[in-house]
Amino acid sequence: MRRSYVLVALCAVAVGCAVSTQQEVQMGQQYSTQLNSTLPIVTDPAVQAYVNQLGNSMAKLTGRADLDWKFFVVNTEVVNAFALPGGYIYVNRGVIERADKMDELAGVIGHEIGHVVKRHSLKQMQQQQGANVGIALTCVLTHVCDSDASQAAIQLGGAAVFAKFSRQDEKDADEEGFKNVIRAGISPKGLASFFQKLMAEEKGGGSPVDAWFSDHPLTQDRIADIQKLIDAKDPAILRTLAEDNGAFHEFKDRVHALPPGPKPKTP
Ligand SMILES: [Zn+2]
C-alpha cells in the first residue's frame, strides 16, 4: 500500500520521472479508498447509479476509456468537484443542487474527466506530495489525526488537500470537457452556463462557491473561450445535442431529499 506513494514522492523530486498508467491507477485507488472512508459519500444506489451512468457515458468515449472510471457524490453543500489520478471523480452535492439542467452537471463532470485524461490530477498530486498529501498519508498510517483529516477533506474538494490547477490546465480541461459532452450527445452550453452562474454567485464573496474558485481558477475569459468553442460549432449539430432530461431531475430530487451533510469547518 505504501509503495506507490513512495514512488510518487520520489518522482516529485526527480525531474521528468514518468509514472505508468498502472502506477497512476494504483495511486488513485489508494487515495480514493482513503477519501471514501473520511468523506460523507452518498450511498443511495439510485444516486450512485445515475452519476456513474452519466460519467461513464462521457469517460468511456475518451482516449482513456481503458480506465475503470468511478464517480461519487459527496454530501456537502460546498460547491466543488475533483478528480483523482486513475479516473476517480467526486462531485459535491452543492454542484448538483445548483445545476438546473442535465447539461450543466455533465459539463462539470466532463471538465473533471478532462483533468484525468490530460493527467493533470497526477501532476497535481505529485506537486502536492511534500505537503498536504503527505500529511494526509501520515494520518492514514498513524490514525492519530482522523478527525482533522476528515474536517480538511470535507472542505472539499478540498482546497486543503489539493493543489490549485494552473490556468492552462483549466483551459485544457474546459476544452476536453467541451469534447467529452459532445461525444456523448450532450450540449456543451451547460458548461458555459454553469460557470457563469458560479461567477455571479462568487461576486458576493464568502459564499459556498469559494472552494471551486480555489481549486479551479475561473475567470470571465475562460467562459468566453468556452463560448467561442460553442459558437464555432455547427448550429445544426448543436440542435441535436441533449440539454436536459427527466432522469436528471429524478436524480436531483433524490439528492435534494438527502439529509444534510456535515457542516464544513469555517476557516
Ligand atoms: Zn478544473
Image: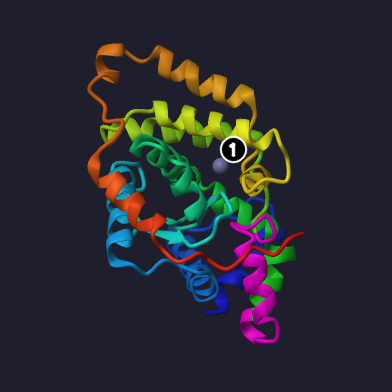
Q: Residue at x 50, y 64 (%)?
A: 260
The type of residue carrying mark 1 is Asp
The answer to whether one can see residue 155 in this image is: yes
Q: Is residue 100 above or below residue 64?
A: above
Q: Residue at x 29, y 34 (%)?
A: 244
The answer to whether one can see residue 66 in this image is: no
Whether residue 223 sits left or right of residue 152 in the image: it is: left
Q: Residue at x 62, y 32 (%)?
A: 199
Q: Is residue 47 above or below residue 175?
A: below
Question: In this picture, which residue range is highlighted in magenta?
Answer: 140-161
Q: Position of residue 191 (x, y in %)?
A: 45, 32
Q: Is 192 colored magenta in this rendering? A: no
Ligand 1 shown in quarter: top right
Q: Quadrant of the C terminus?
A: bottom right
Q: Is residue 170 above or below residue 12?
A: above
Which residue is the site of mark 1? 169
Name the residue nearer the viewer: 89 or 126: 89
Whether residue 245 sits left or right of residue 22 in the image: it is: left
Indicate the secondary structure of the residue bearing disc 1: helix
Label 1 CB less than 8 angstroms from ligand 1:
yes
Furthest residue to the right?
267
Whether residue 243 sits left or right of residue 206 in the image: it is: left
Q: Position of residue 138 (x, y in %)?
A: 68, 79
Q: Position of residue 33 (x, y in %)?
A: 48, 73
Which color scheme is applied? rainbow
Q: Is 151 colored magenta in this rendering? A: yes
Name the residue nearer the viewer: 68 or 193: 193
Q: Position of residue 65 (x, y in %)?
A: 31, 49
